[in-house]
Image: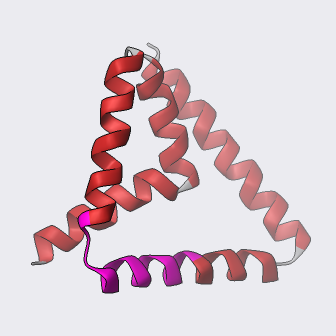
């Protein structure tokens, strides 16, 4: 049960997280279009098979993170964005070596 929950969490973070999307963008870019389509389809099927309560919980957590970000001071939001952009570029450089 815990392993399954962990797998779901990792998948969703990869799909919805800003860092996850930056990571996926670099890796998926190297895949042929057919393989990318197949992976997207597998992720959709995985999401559809999740129990409704898990989906709702992940949606609620995402909404809470979004609201917390919106309530941050503008300087803090700007600093966080800059930090995430820096990580994205660092990850991109490492992935292309």
Q: Residue at x 38, y 14 (%)?
A: 32
Residue at x 48% of width, y 48% of height: 20
**Foreground: 43 or 10?**
43
Q: Is residue 24 above or below residue 66?
A: above
Q: Quadrant of residue 49?
A: bottom left
Which percent across, then down, holds residue 6?
Answer: 22, 68
The location of residue 16, given as percent across then percent down, is: 51, 57
What span is colored magenta in the figure?
49-62
State the quadrant of the C terminus.
top left
Q: Quadrant of residue 90?
A: top right
Is 2 left or right of 52, judged from the image as shown? left
| Main secondary structure type of the part rendered in magenta | helix
Q: Residue at x 42, y 18 (%)?
A: 33
* Residue 9 magenta-highlighted: no
Q: Quadrant of the N terminus?
A: bottom left
Q: Is residue 78 left or right of residue 96?
A: right
Q: Residue 96's spot in the image, x, y percent?
A: 47, 15
């Amino acid at each position: 049960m815990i392993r399954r929950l962990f797998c779901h969490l990792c998948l969703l973070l990869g799909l919805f997280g800003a860092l996850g999307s930056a990571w996926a963008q670099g890796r998926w870019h190297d895949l042929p279009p057919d393989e990318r389509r197949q992976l997207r389809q597998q992720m959709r099927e995985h999401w559809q098979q999740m129990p409704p309560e898990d989906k709702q919980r992940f949606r609620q957590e995402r909404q809470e993170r979004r609201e917390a970000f919106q309530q941050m001071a503008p300087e803090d939001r700007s600093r966080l964005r800059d930090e995430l952009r820096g990580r994205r570029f660092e990850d991109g450089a490492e992935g292309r070596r």
